[in-house]
Image: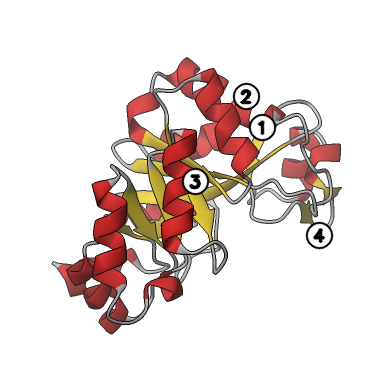
């Protein structure tokens, strides 16, 4: 899966990056989404952007006028036909414009319904209430719990199962060492997918694939395709 598209050859989270990921043979892409002041969804990593400030306080017209490379989620989905799209809801109490009412989650579900593409997406977040809200609105949408070093893989898997999520998305570094396959097997035994991020090293791609991960998110889908075949 292209992490923010093929972000080694194009500016991350742009239409060009997602087209490049598709052209490089990616099976899917990962992207970051925020809401605008007028209820639209834009694809950008941070809650703030240079030249516009806090995205949640600006309209989509203001954002695209100042930063024409920032696409709407709708526009990205248009160019990702046939790909799995991992939509990461960026929401944290530490963010500017924190979405405490989970309006972004609701807007994502509404957009997916309008496009009739519930079977080609996976919605993920570090913020559990965001993906919990997606599940509340439509339990048929696959959701993934993102984490780095805390909690551990097994604890994260237990949380995901308890809350009805279908995948865990650990930082690849937590699966270092000989225990990787055992941890992945334990997650699989609970019915979870294990999708890791962000892997750009050939040896790590091979190690993680051999350990049984379901997806590798990478800045270079071309490299992953060549290495993994």
Q: Disc 3 versus disc 1: distance between alpha carbons?
A: 22 Å
Label 3 close to label 4 by CB (< 8 Å):
no
Residue occupied by mark 1: 104
Residue occupied by mark 4: 50
Q: Which numbered disc flags the more N-terminal residue, 4 or 2? A: 4
At label 4, counting other C-alpha atoms closer than 10 Å, the crowd grade (few under 14, some 14-19, many 20 or more) is few
Along the viewing direction, whichever of 105 and 48 lies nearer the viewer: 105
Residue occupied by mark 2: 106
The residue under the point 79% across, 52% down is 95
**Which label lies toward us, 2 or 3?**
3
Residue occupied by mark 3: 159
Image coordinates of residue 23 in percent, x first then y, are 30, 55
Q: Disc 1 on helix, strand or loop?
A: helix
At label 3, counting other C-alpha atoms closer than 10 Å, the crowd grade (few under 14, some 14-19, many 20 or more) is some
Label 2 close to label 1 by CB (< 8 Å):
yes
**Which label lies toward us, 1 or 4?**
1
Q: Disc 1 versus disc 4: distance between alpha carbons?
A: 21 Å
Q: Disc 3 versus disc 4: distance between alpha carbons?
A: 36 Å
**Which label lies toward us, 3 or 4?**
3
**Which label lies toward us, 4 or 2?**
2
The residue under the point 46% across, 71% down is 8
Q: Which numbered disc flags the more N-terminal residue, 2 or 3? A: 2
């Amino acid at each position: 899966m292209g992490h923010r598209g093929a972000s080694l050859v194009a500016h991350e989270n742009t239409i060009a990056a997602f087209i490049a990921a598709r052209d490089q043979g990616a099976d899917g892409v990962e992207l970051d989404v925020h809401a605008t002041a007028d209820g639209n969804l834009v694809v950008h990593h941070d809650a703030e952007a240079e030249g516009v400030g806090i995205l949640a306080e600006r309209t989509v017209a203001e954002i695209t006028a100042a930063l024409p490379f920032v696409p709407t989620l709708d526009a990205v989905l248009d160019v990702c036909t046939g790909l799995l799209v991992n939509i990461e809801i960026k929401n944290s109490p530490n963010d500017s414009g924190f979405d405490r009412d989970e309006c972004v989650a609701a807007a994502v579900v509404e957009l997916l319904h309008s496009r009739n593409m519930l079977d080609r997406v996976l919605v993920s977040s570090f913020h559990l209430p965001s993906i919990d809200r997606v599940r509340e609105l439509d339990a048929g949408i696959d959701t993934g719990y993102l984490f780095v070093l805390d909690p551990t893989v097994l604890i994260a898997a237990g949380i995901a199962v308890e809350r009805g999520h279908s995948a865990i998305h650990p930082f690849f570094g937590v699966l270092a060492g000989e225990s990787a396959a055992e941890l992945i097997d334990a997650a699989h035994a609970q019915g979870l997918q294990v999708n890791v991020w962000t892997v750009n090293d050939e040896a790590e791609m091979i190690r993680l694939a051999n350990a049984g991960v379901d997806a590798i998110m990478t800045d270079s889908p071309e490299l992953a395709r060549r290495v993994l075949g």
